[in-house]
Amino acid sequence: MSSKVAFHTLGCKLNFSETSTIGNQFIKNGFEIVDYNEIADVYVINTCTVTENADRECRQIVRRALRNNPNAYVLVTGCYAQLKPDEIASIEGVDAVLGSNEKFSLFSYINSFEKKNYSCVYVSETEELESFYSAQSSDADGRTRAFFKVQDGCDYKCSFCTIPLARGKSRSMNPNEVVQQFTQLLKQGYKEIILTGVNVGDYFYSKNTDNSTSLDVENKFQPDYDLYQLLQSMVMIEGDFRIRISSIEPNLLTDEIIDLAISDERLCNHFHIPLQSGSNNILKLMQRRYKAEDYKELILKLTSSIKNVGIGVDVIVGFPGETEDDFLETYNLLRDLPISYLHVFTYSKRPNTKAVDLSGEVNVNERKKRNNMLRILSEKKRQDFYRKMIGEKVKVLFEDENLGGFMKGFSSNYVRVKYTFREELLNQFASVIIKEVDENICTVEIL
């Protein structure tokens, strides 16, 4: 009987793609993947440094695993493991801690998944974070939509962020490998490919700084290659698919990329564009690379150029120095912009960031109040966007699940829909008309 392994992933879509790649290692070594709530022999926790209260959250997830099986081997990896290996190694029940590089070859570090209860193996920061390790959805991931990592690391110096410390400098996959692996994902049956990375818009490949894991593919591209050129090469591939960019910085969403989304429906008319603050004072303290008026101009350009474009926004409340007026600038900007939804984060201190030393700490209760105000605004924006879509014809990719007699899916512009379960529609694009809004989902009629 094969051993069982279960995974829990915290954080971004990039982490999900990497968890799937880690899962592939276990499958190749004879393991069966089960749900994290089931009894497993090995539990793998892929952590995130952005998550608030990362230490407490990690402890809770470890305890949950050990409640399922007190004798299970517990392995923790990811960004938090890279930054705080000693902290994680001290958590009772953790058997191994692997850093950002090591998780991609964990079987070379761990020979036996046997719980010892007296020592914790941890390996991290053993080499510079300069190599690029590919990651994408696979048999280890039961999703209809595939996460595909094409970029890693970040050269930006945002004053609140520890990700550059956890993942190193910006580096990108060889475009030849991108096309090769992208084509393989399509052959595996994935219909939507979500391009992930720490800073996807910063994708840039140069033969002079290649960090690829394998270079035995045919080199047919130009010496320098950016995200627009990469997208161009991907939409030239024949097939019934669409590409979604997980997130892109406002200063990196170029006119060329917008024009490509207009001309080719296989590039989703949905962009998730971090704002973080609508106050220029706070943007400067955050060391962001644009002003509020630049962001507004971009959003208005998108909505005037692309019909029914969906726009998601990241925003941070309670950053040091954020006055009531600064917050209201953010709130009013977002209220007036034609966006679809918000991801709202409450600022919390991160060691080894510049923001830790900034004055003007915002009271915790005030942070919560501001967070709540923006969450309410987000729901209003989502409802308004969904209602605006009533009567519109869209193409939906239905996901591989039967939920109480219904199936769910997403349109290109990221409207979530449901329809009576029909097996022949699973993992298929279907043209539908949006009929009505039912809370946070739309009901549709198949054409």
Image: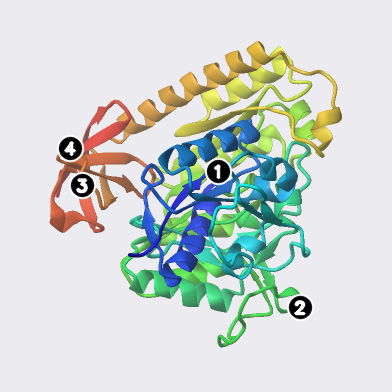
Q: Nearer the viewer, mark 4 or mark 3?
A: 4
Residue to which mark 1 is pinned: 11
Q: Residue 259: which disc?
A: none
Q: Nearer the viewer, mark 2 or mark 4?
A: 4
Residue annotated with mark 4: 404
The amino acid type, in three-letter code, at marker 4 is: Gly
Q: Residues within 10 Å of mark 2 (few under 14, many from 20)?
A: few
User: Is residue 236 at all visible to an observer of this figure?
Assistant: no
Q: Residue at x 76, y 41 (%)?
A: 158
* Mark 1 surroundings: few (<14), some (14-19) or many (≥20) residues within 10 A: some
Q: Is residue 356 left or right of residue 224?
A: right
Q: Please say if 339 is above or below 269.
A: above
Q: CA separation, marks 1 and 4?
A: 28 Å
Query: Helix, strand or loop at disc 3?
Result: strand
- For label 1, the SS is loop
> Which circle's residue, 4 or 3, is located before the other in the chain?
4
Residue identifier under label 2: 208
